[in-house]
Each structure stands twice: as structure tokens, then as C-alpha cells.
Amino acid sequence: MCPCCASRTKKVENELPQNELWQLYRAAYEQYQSVIIKGEKSYSRYVNDFIYYHLPCTSIREADIRLHVMHLFALKELLEERPDLVDAFFSKDSFEEKDFLKMDDLFNKGKSLEEPEPVFLAHFNVEQIRLITKFASSTNLFQRKVTEKDIKDLFECRLSIPLQATVNRHVAIFFGKLREHGLLPYSWQMIMDNHKLVSSSVNNEPLRASQLRCGLSQARVANLRKKPNSNITDDGIGFYDSCDVFIKKLKECL
């Protein structure tokens, strides 16, 4: 049962719960954990499905209906316009009422998280840099051969010239997997965008955060469609699995 409905008894089944907005946030968090973290849906499909599912209002009072619509579309705006807050709060292992209050306050005031954005993607040790360089070369992640210095400068945001991707989606998958395994900060896409770390395989223009986000969503959906013994051939799916295996090995060197 939807959290927004669970607290209603038969006596008050036609009344909105007093904490409906908190319950909607909580439901959105649980759905995010279920379908986005696990890669079962694209982000836009998650947002639309959530809003459409919660659109009906059980109350017949006009004031309740207006309040419900206001709550729901405020949350829709948050999900669509503030991916920084969504990723920061909904990627956490838990989401309590204090998290909701802070998230809602930041959204209403148009503010960002107070913590400063990291000026690097990650600090890897010498062995990890060696392994990443070898993996990038063997998979042709970038169009030119990369050195260990290139890879170190990439993750520490010190590149003077972006590394050009061979396949944009592969770059999104690789860095997305690093984030999924806890090796990159939640704002990795914006950091790569701001520091112009990787350029497009198509026109050599720096990849934007939106392009990385879109590429990762497409890869997750494609990976979901890949079933055991399927005849689907998609090099992105093979690369998706290769990244998982490699990054698990990479974490052993921490």
C-alpha cells in the first residue's frame, strides 16, 4: 500500500493525512531506491510513473484536493528541476523525516547543499591508477592512448585538454559504475561537466552532465532488457558487465 494511504483508517479514509508531503517524499525515495538505483527504469519514466500513480485524491473536499495537487506538483518540479538534491538525498541508505525537512527547505529556497563541491573526482592509489589505465586502453575508452599521468590528472581534474571518448555511452557507463560502487561523489556528472574532462566522440565538444546522465539511463534500460540466453547483441551491455567485474577488482586494491 502507498505510504500516503497506509495511515488512513476507515473513519478518516476521505481525509488527507496531516503529513502528506512527507509521505509523498518518502514514497518517491522508496521508488527511486527500487527502480533507479537498481537500474530498472529510466529517470523520466520513474518521475512520470510516480506522479501518475499518486495523482488521484481520495478526499472529496475541495480544499484537500487543491492541497494534494499542490504537494504532488511541487514534488514533480523537484524531481525534474533539482536532480542534484534528488541524487544527494535519494541515493542515501536511509531517508528520515529530518532529511525530508532539509531537502524540502533547500528546494523551496532555491539553495544547493551547504557542503562544498569536491574539486576532484577521486584520489586513487598508484596500483588503482595502473589498473584503470590498463582497462581504459584495453577497452578503447578514449580515442587516443592514455598514460597513467593522463588518468591521474583526469580524476584529479587537472587535464589541460579533455580526453575524447570513443563511445560516449561507454564513458557514462564506466563513471556511473564507479559512482555506483561508491568510488565517485554523487555530483560526478557536474564535476566532469564543469572541468571539461571528457569530450564527445561525435564533435569533440566537452560532454555535458545531461549527456552523461542520458547515456547512463539508456545503458541501464538496455541492460535491463538483456535476459539470460537472449539473442540481443549490444556492445554497451557487454561493456556494462565488464565494468562491473573490473571495478570489483579495483576496490580490492583500496
Image: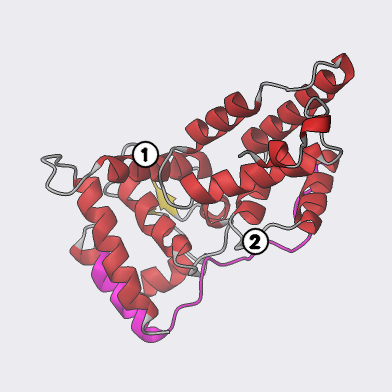
Say which quadrant the C terminus sits in.
bottom left
Evaluate whether residue 73 shows in this view.
yes
Q: Going by the image, does 81 lie left or right of 69?
A: left
Residue at image point 83% right, 41% down:
19
| Closest to the observer, 169 or 199 | 169
The label on residue 218 is 1
Tell me the kind of residue under disc 2: Ser
Quarter of image, res 148: bottom left
Q: Secondary structure at mark 2?
A: loop
Answer whether residue 133 is magenta in the image: yes
Q: Can you give x and y, in whole percent of width and height, for residue 43 in the image?
A: 50, 38
Say which quadrant the N terminus sits in.
top right
Q: Circle 2 is placed at which residue position?
A: 94
Marker count (numbered): 2
Residue at image point 31% right, 77% down:
249
Evaluate whether residue 146 shows in this view.
no
Residue at image point 85% right, 42% down:
109
Q: Residues within 10 Å of mark 1 (few under 14, many from 20)?
A: many
C-alpha distance separating marks 1 and 2: 26 Å
What colouring style does the render use?
secondary structure
Say which label, 1 or 2, has the lower sequence index: 2
Tell me the kind of residue under disc 1: Gln
Q: Please provide the residue range marked out in magenta.
A: 110-136
Q: Nearer the viewer, mark 1 or mark 2?
A: 2
